[in-house]
Image: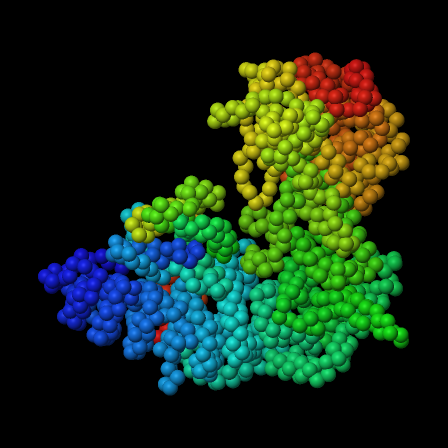
Amino acid sequence: MSYAYLFKYIIIGDTGVGKSCLLLQFTDKRFQPVHDLTIGVEFGARMITIDSKQIKLQIWDTAGQEAFRSITRSYYRGAAGALLVYDITRRETFNHLTTWLDDARQHSNSNMVIMLIGNKSDLESRREVKKEEGEAFAREHGLVFMETSAKTAANVEEAFINTAKEIYEKIQEGVFDINNEANGIKIGPQHSPTNPSLPGATGSSGSQGGGCC
Amino acid sequence: MFRSRSWFGGGWGRPKNPHSLEHLKYLYNVLSRNQTVSEHNRGLLVETLRSIAEILIWGDQNDSSVFDFFLEKNMLSFFLRIMRQRSGGSSFVCVQLLQTLNILFENIRNETSLYYLLSNNHVNSIIVHKFDFSDEEVMAYYISFLKTLSLKLNAHTIHFFYNEHTNDFPLYTEAIKFFNHPESMVRIAVRTLTLNVYKVEDTSMLAFIRDRTAAPYFSNIVWFIGKHIQELDNCVRNDADHQSQNRLSDLVAEHLDHLHYLNDILCLNITDLNQVLTDHLLHKLLIPLYIFSLTKRTTPLGDVASANMNRLLQNRALSLENSWSPHHENYINGGKVSCVVALFLLSQVFLIVYHAPLVQTLAWIILKTDKTSYEGGVDKLLEQYSTEMKKQKQRIEESVDSDTSTQSSSKEGSHENLLEEQRNVTDEEKQRLATSPSESVVGIEKPFLETIFNSLDCTENDYTTLFSLCLFYAVANNKGIRSDIIEQILKPKKTLVSKSTNDKDIKYSYNMQLVDKILHVVMLSCQPTCRVRLVTLELALKLLVQLVMCDGKCILLDSHKLTIEAAKSQSTALLRNFYKSEEIFLDMFEHEYCDMQKGLLNVEWLCMDSAVLLPPTGTPMTGIDFTKRLPCGEVERARRAIRVFFLVRDVVLTLNGEIETQLPLTNPQSCVQIDQALDLSISRYNSDLIGCTVIYKDGTKMRRFLVIDILQLILVEPDTKRLGWGVAKLVGFLQDIEVSGDKDDSRCLHITIHRPLSGTTTNRIPLLSAKFVFDDNIRCMAAKQRLTKGRIKARQKKMQHIARLLEIPGQSGPPSPAFMGASGGGYTSRQMGRNRERPLFNRCPGLAAPRRESSPSVVHRADAEARRSRNTAESPSRVSKLRNEASPRTNKEDRSRDSSSSSKTRSRDSSPRMPRPRSEEIPLELIKKAPNSVIDMAPKISILPRPQTPKIECEQSQLEKSGASRDKDSGVSLISDISEETSFIADEGDSAMIAKSFVETI
C-alpha cells in the first residue's frame, strides 16, 4: 500500500501499564476485549488519513529491552513520535514519568512529539492518579495529554492520530528534516525524489534493495 | 485490512462463542478448505488467522484442550503452506500470519503451551522461509517476530532454536543477515536479538556463535563502522560552514550507537566472544584507523593493515555477503581520518567502553608506543604490548620501575629546568622550557602522545585542544584501565621513598609537562581577546584538578601554584572591566552563576554533541550552546568573563582546600521561605510593616501585611497561634520588583515581582503581579518609597559584594593613597575621571586592548559605578555625595558629567567615535528587565546621546543647571524628594545631616 509519509512511533512507560495492549488495540481493532482477555503485541502498523493524505504509522514497543543501553538509545533516536504511558490505577507509574521523559529527551531528536497517556481509564473505581495531575504534568513539560482505555478503546484512536497530526504539522512547518531517515519519518515511495547518489545507509526507499538474502 | 467476512464464512455454522474449542474447530475447517490463497479467499484467511491467535491465547489461559487440538491438527503446517505460496497477494496474508505468530509468542504464559508450539520445528521452518523482504511491511513484521522469539530464549527454549547436532541456529543466522539493513528499526531489532541470544548461558550454543559466526559477523560490524567513520570524516572536512549539522549529528549518534552496542556485548562478559570481538576491534578498527590517524606521517601502515585484513578475510568461516569483500581494501587504503575526528572518536571509545583488555591495550599504545614499534604497524604494536605485559607479569616490581624510568627521567629533567628558572621568566618562556627538553624525548619516542600533546596548543584556537583534553580525561577516568598505565601521565604518582631508617616518606609527583600545557590553556582563557571556548577552559580545569589532587591534597608545585594564582587575578581583572552599574550586570552575574551550578560539565555528553566537531564559531545563529562557541558581542563577552571568573575561582578554592563562602550572592539559608513563621516584633521586620489588600488579576482579594526585609519582600498573614507573629505567604526578591502608582487611585500600587533569571526554566511569568490597596495615600506612598528604596539597596548591596569579589578598591580595606588626595571636597568631574582611570590600568596591564574595544560610554559607566562605590568607603561626606548622585534629583548633573567625561574618554582614545551606544552595545540597553519607570528611580547613570555638550568643569554650574531642570520638571522633583527622604530614614544620622545640608545648598 502506498503512503505519503511513514511515521515511526515508540511506546514507553513502566511495565504493565498496557503499552502493548494499546498498540494492538490501535492496529488491530478486532481484539476488543469484551471478554476478560488481555492481548498485546510488540509491533504494529496501520494506515491513517490526515489532511487527505495517507499516512502509515509504525509502532514499536520497546518493552523488555531496557537492560541494553544501546537498544533504548537507538529506539529513541529512530522515532518521530513517542507515547509515554502510565497507569491511572498505579501511582508509581505516574511518578516514574520524569525518568522516562528525561531519557527520551536525552536520546531522542529534539523534534520528537511526545504524547502523555493515562491508560486504563475504564477502571475509574481504582483510580489513583487524577486526570488533573496528568494534565498538569503534560502542561509543565509541554506534552499533549489524553486518558485512554485499551479495553474499551476509548481515545485510543485519538491518541495515535493526534500525535500523527502534530508530527504532520511539524513537517508542514519544515521543522522535521524529512529526508533524514534517522528522524523516524519516511517519505512514501511515490513521493520520494529519486536520489540514488545518497550515500550509505540512508536510502529513502530502502526496501527496494532487498533484505540482503 | 479490515475486510468484512467474505461470502464464504457465513453459512458454516460458526459457533456463537468465539472463545471455544468449537470455534477453533470451525476455523480449522476454514483453513483446510482454503489451502490455496487466492484473490477471493485472502480476506477470509486473514480473518481466520486473527481469530486463531485470539482463541489460542484464550485457551492458554482457560482451556488446555484448545492447544491440544491446535497441535493435534498440526495447524502450524497450514501456516507454512500458506506462506510458501507466491501468488494471490500472499504478502497481505503473510503479514497477518506473522502478526498472529507475534501475538501467540508474546502472550502465551503457559510454558508447556510454548514448548508445544516450538516442538515440531515448524517455527524454524518459518524463520528460514524466504519472505518477500522487499516489502517493508513484511520485513518489519518478520523482524519483530524474530525479536519476539529472542525474548523467549532461555536455557530450556534455546534447544528448540539451536540444533547442536546439525550445528544450526537459524534464528540467529537469519537475523544477523539484516544487521546493516537500511531501516534503522530493523537494525535495532537485530541488535536486540543478538544480545538476547548471547545472554543465554548455553556453552555449546556460544561455542557455535564463536566458531561459526563471530569472525564474519564482528568483522562486518567493524568494517561498517570503519566505513561510517570515513563518511563522518568527510562530513567534517567538507563542512566548515556548519551547513550539514543534521547529517553530522546523525553520523555521530550512529557511531555512539555502535559503541554502545559493542559495549553491551562486552558487558555480557562472555570470555570467548569478547576475545574475538576485542581482537577484531583492535586489529582492524581502533588501532589502524583511530590511533594511526593521530599522526600525520605516512607509514608502511597501509600495506601492513591491508595484509592483515586479507588474512582475516580468508579466515572467515562463512561469508555473510560476498559483495562486501572488495570494499575492505578500499577503506583501509583510503587510510586515515583527520586528527580532530580521531581524537573525538577515541574519546568516545574511552568514555563508553570499559572492557579491560580492550581499553588497556589502547591506552598503553597511545601513551607508551615508541617510534620503532610504531613503524612496524599494528601487529608490531600489539606484539610489543603483549611482551610488555608478559614482562610485567614476570617481575612486577622491577618492570614498573623500568617502564617508567624513561618517563620519569624526562619528567625530572623538565622539572629541574623549571625549578631553576622559574623566577624571572615569562609564561611563554616557561612554556618553552617545559616543552623543549621533553620534546626530544616524547617527540621521537612517543608519536601518538606527541600528537595529543601538540593538539593541546590553543594559541590560534582551541579546536583540537578540546578533544585532546577530552581524550586525556576519558583515559584517566576509564575504570577498565589499570592505574599503572596512566600513573604519572594522567594521574599523580605516589612513590614510597624509603630512607635508611625505617620511616618511609610518600613522594608525590605529577606530569609537569601536561600541567604546564593545561595551565597555558587556562592563562590564555583569561586573556580578553583569546579564542578559547568556555567548555575548553572548564574541561582543562577539571583535568587539572585530577592531575594534581592526590589523597585529598594538592601536590601542585609552587611555580604552578603561582601560575594558577596569576590566572585568577587575570580573570578577576578581566571581569572588572565589565563591572558596571548597569542593572543587567547584576542580573547577568547571578544568572550565570545559577546556570553554571545547574549545568556542570559532563564530558560524556560533551562527546555526544556533534557541534563541537566543527571548527569553533562565534555566531549564535548556528544554535550551538554558548559555552561551546566563542562569545559574540559585548553582552556575551561579559557573560564569558563572568564565567571564566567563576571557573578559575572555583578551581583555586578547590586546590587550596577551601570552601566557597562568597557565592552565590544570595545565601538561600538566610532567606525567608513560604509558610515560615516570623516574629514580627523584632526590629528586623517591625519597622516596615504595612497593612494592605492584595488584589490579583483574577479578582481574588487578600488581606496581608507587607514586610520589607533586606533582600526580600514578604507578604505575611498574622499567625493565629502566636501574637505578634506572622506567616510568610509570599516571598520575592526586592531586586526583582517593579512598582508603579495608579493614576486613578492614590492608595494603589501595582507591584510585579519577576522571577529570578535562571537558565533551565523558561518560565517568564512573574511570581506576582497584583494591585495593592493601602489604607490611605500616605501609607501607599510610604510603601512605594520603601519598596523602591529596598530594590535599590538590595541591588547596591549585591553590587558591593561583587565589587569586593573583584577586589575593586574602596570595597574592602582602606582606600589606596591615590584616592586620598581627591577626597577633599569639591573636586571636579575631570579629576574623578582621571583618578578612576589610573588604578584600572595600573592593576591590570595588558588590558588596554579590551578597553579600547569597548565603547567609551561603557567604560564610563564602569567608571561612574566604581567611583560611587569607592566613595562609599571613603568618608561620610562622600557617602552623602553618593546619595545625592544616586537620587534622580541630580540626574541632570550626572548626565552632564557623563558627557564631559565621555568626551574626555573619546579624546583619550583619540578616536572619532561618538560617545553614543554602538550597535554592539545596543543589546545591553534592550535586554534591560525593568521598564523605564523603575529604571528612572534606580541609581543608574543613564547616557543620553548628547555628544555636543561642552565640558563643564565647574560643579557650581552643574548644580545650577540641575536646579533649573528641576523646576521645569516638577514631576521628577516630586519623586526625588520622596526618595531623598527615604534615604534619610535609612542612613545614620550624621551623614543624613550632611546630605540634607547639601540638598539645601541647591
Q: Residue at x 17, y 65 (%)?
A: B22
Residue at the spot 43% in from the left edge and 65% down from the top edge: B188
Q: Quadrant of the C terminus of chain B?
A: top right
Give the x, y percent position of residue B344: 59, 64
Quarter occupied by residue B964: top right
Is residue B400 shown left or right of residue A196?
right
Where is residue B10 drawn, in percent x and y? 12, 60
Residue placed most toward the observer, A71 or B558: A71
User: Up-down: is A37 above or below B982?
Assistant: below
Vertical order, B38 against B300 (above or below): above
Q: Vertically, is A142 above or below B92?
A: above
Image quarter (top left, top right, bottom left or bottom right) of the N terminus of chain B? bottom left
Taking the view exactly as shown, the residue that stands out farthest to the left is B11
**Would residue B600 be found to the left or right of residue B28 on screen?**
right
The structure's colour scheme is rainbow
Q: Is residue B994 left or right of residue B177?
A: right
